[in-house]
Amino acid sequence: MAKRYKRSRIKRKRTRLSASNAGPILALLSTIVGILGALALIAFVALPRILPLVGIDRMPWQPTPSPSPTMRPTPTPYPLTNVDLIELQHEVVLPSTGFNAYRWFADPYAYGDRLVFVAGQLVGNNIHMDALFSLDMKTNETTKLTAERKNQDYVYPVCNDKWLVYLDGMPGGGGTIRAMQWSTSQTIKVADVYTGQPRLHLDGDTLAWMQRTGSKMDKLYVCDLNTLENVAVETFNNSSYGQSDISLSRGELLYAYLDKDVDETVQGARITSGLYSVSLSTGKSNVFLPGTYAHDPLTNGTYWVWRDGLHGENNALYYSKQGSPPQKIADQIVDYGLSDSFVAYSKNNAQIMVYIFDKKAAFPITPEVERERTQLLNVSNGVVIWMDITSRERDIMKYARVE
């Protein structure tokens, strides 16, 4: 009988982790973790409870407390992004004594901390804008200026740290352009104006304006206020460009005129314009062709802005940086004004907006129209000025410093 052999099971020997190569390392790490945990319990749980009992109020490694809370530094956002618009705006208010008759305001202009503006009173059945005021925007102190006036109204005052220039205007148009030095209060006659009321543009000692000189002729003048020498830079004969405003800033004169590559007499031709810039220091002139019609161009020495139609039309607002391709800012604008870093513009039944060039974004500078209806008056040297027309019982002029 054949023998049966029993198949025996082979028992595998289990390997303990402690007997492996990693065992001593794991044991050491466990010991270190245990010690650190015990130290943490002593330092952060036991000691804070025990030390006050023996008169010690802080841990040795804790800093000495300051007498007043340390303010957490906060980032400085652009002022229009995180600001209460009511806090940003200020109302122009005349002193209550002696000036109650002046209920109408017009033609504001800001330079530095000074805001100059015209005020009017009722004389007979007519409003005479016969007072000129200066407001210190830091102290809110208002001063009535005694600049010479021989006609009825002060019109379009502009100023810098040396000069105050304005039109001494007549009711039906025309008058005399006058300039006063702040340091001496001496007033000089710059030029006579026979028709219309030209807007004045001041840059240093240089004054520029567009003036109607004939039934269908306009001339662009530049005058040195020190010598009173003036030059006609351009003549516009029976042209809508003679009714376009001009701009003067940082030694650059800017105006709109014909795109000389386009024959406007051709029926159906697209009417485009040229923006002509003149350096006052060199007399050199350059033309930029934006590919649109251009009216009322403004310059700050770096950016040019313009509207693509006449007043009263559904204009779009454009800008170019030193001759770069034009960029549209907004459609259906009514008025606008330019400062160093932004352009402010208004639309019908809408808030006044401020478009920041570097951010390529627009922010509201006035509350919603349900709270405040506005009319943009001027933008000059970082200050936006408007009229609150929510109520027409009296003129309410407001301003906000953006730069």
Image (cartoon, grey):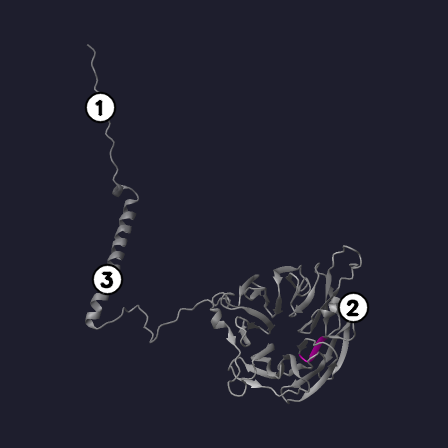
Element at label 3 = helix
Judging depth in this view, the residue of 390 and 262 nearest the camera is: 390
The amino acid on which the numbered mark 1 sits, given as a three-letter code, is Ser
List the residue tagged with mark 2. 238
Residue 44 versus residue 219 in the image, above or below: above
> Relative to residue 119, is residue 258 depicted above or below?
above
The one of 132 and 44 positioned closer to us in this rendering: 132
Q: Amino acid at mark 2?
A: Asn
CA gap, disc 1 and disc 3: 60 Å
Indicate whether 319 appears above or below 378.
Answer: above
The residues colored magenta run: 204-209
Query: Which residue ends up furthest to the top in the rendered image?
Result: 1
Q: Which percent across, then down, holds residue 72? A: 40, 69
Q: Earlier in the sequence, mark 1 or mark 3?
A: 1
Location of mark 3 (residue): 45
Question: Residue 168: horizontal and vertical position, in percent?
Answer: 68, 83
What is the crowding at mark 1: few (fewer than 14 residues within 10 Å), some, or many (at least 20)? Answer: few
Instruction: Judge from the rendering whether residue 85 lies leftward or rightward of residue 49; answer left or right.
Output: right
